[in-house]
Amino acid sequence: MHVRLNPPLWRHDAYTLRKLVAALQKTLNQLIAQRILTQDSTVVDLGAGDAPYRPLFLPHCRRYLACDLAEGPGIDIVFKPGQPLELESGSADCVVSFQVLEHVWDLDAYLGECLRLLAPDGRLILSTHGTWLYHPHPTDYRRWTPDGLRKELEVRGFDVLEMRPAVGPLACTTQFRTLAYHHLLSRLGPPGRLVAAALCSIMYGRMWIEDKCTPIIQHETNSAIFMVTARPRSSTIRTPS
C-alpha cells in the first residue's frame, strides 16, 4: 500500500494525508452511488506522479490511466505541457488531479485538456491547496480561496458541484510547526528522528482536536486543501480529437 493512503501517525504530514484520503473516499463513494463510476469506466489521472490513489479507483473502473510529464513506474501515458494526450475527446468518465494545479502555470491548457477528455456527464475530481507552504515540484505558483478556485473552473467550462475542505486553519498552523520541528530534529541523527516521531504523534492528536473545535465556516473558507467535484457545462463545445 502506498504510504499516502495510510501514513503512520508519527509521519510528519500524516494528518493532512489522512484527511485528503478521507475527502477523496467520500467523493469516490458518491461517484459509485451515482453510477458515474462503474466497472466499464475510464479514469484519467492527469499529473499522476506515482499514482498513489490508483488502488482506491481500480476496484470500480475498467481502466485507470496514469499520465505524467516523465516516464516512471506505473505511468501509462507521457505528455508534454500544452499538448493534448493521445486519447479521444470525451473518452474519460472521470479525470482526477491530486495536488497538481498549484504547480501548473498554464491553467487554460491544463483545465482545457481535462474538459476535452471528459464525457458529457463525466466528472473532474481535483484537489489543490488553499493554504500551504511553498513546495516546488519543480515549481509552485498558486494558492486559492474557495471563491477563486470555483471561478477558475467556471470560466473554463466547468460547473462546480461540490467543494470539500480538508484541514482547517487551526490544524493547519500546527501542521506547519510540525513540519518545521520534523525537519530540524531529523538533522540530529537517530535520536533526533526518534524525538521527531514522538512529537509528530502528539501533534497529530492536537490537529485532530483543533479541527473538531474549528467552526464549519472556517473549514469551508480557510482550509489547507480543497477537493472539488465538477462536471462539464452542458453548453461547452469541445475541440474534436
Image (cartoon, rainbow, N blue to C red):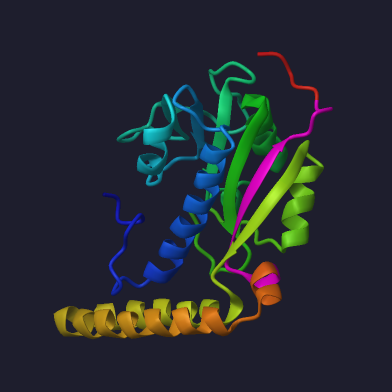
Which range is magenta?
221-236
Residue sitting farthest toward the left: 190
Q: 107 above or below 132?
A: above
Residue sitting farthest toward the front: 33
Q: Is residue 117 left or right of residue 201?
A: right
**Between 192 and 206, which is closer to the camera in this rendering?**
206
- Quarter assignment of residue 71: top left
Q: 10 above or below 77?
A: below
Quick check: can you spot residue 229? Answer: yes
**What residue is drawn where x is 51% and y is 38%?**
32
Is residue 84 within the magenta segment? no
**Between 212 and 176, which is closer to the camera in this rendering?**
212
**Between 218 and 68, which is closer to the camera in this rendering?**
218
Quick check: can you spot residue 106? Answer: no
Residue 110: x percent and y percent?
Answer: 64, 37
Residue 200: x percent and y percent?
Answer: 33, 80
Q: 8 above or below 85?
A: below
Q: Quadrant of the C terminus?
A: top right
Residue 210: x percent and y percent?
Answer: 52, 84
- In this rendering, the count of numbered labels is 0
**What residue is drawn where x is 50% and y is 62%?**
135
**What residue is drawn where x is 62% and y is 39%?**
124
**Between 33 and 145, which is closer to the camera in this rendering?**
33
Is residue 235 within the magenta segment? yes
Residue 237: x percent and y percent?
Answer: 80, 23
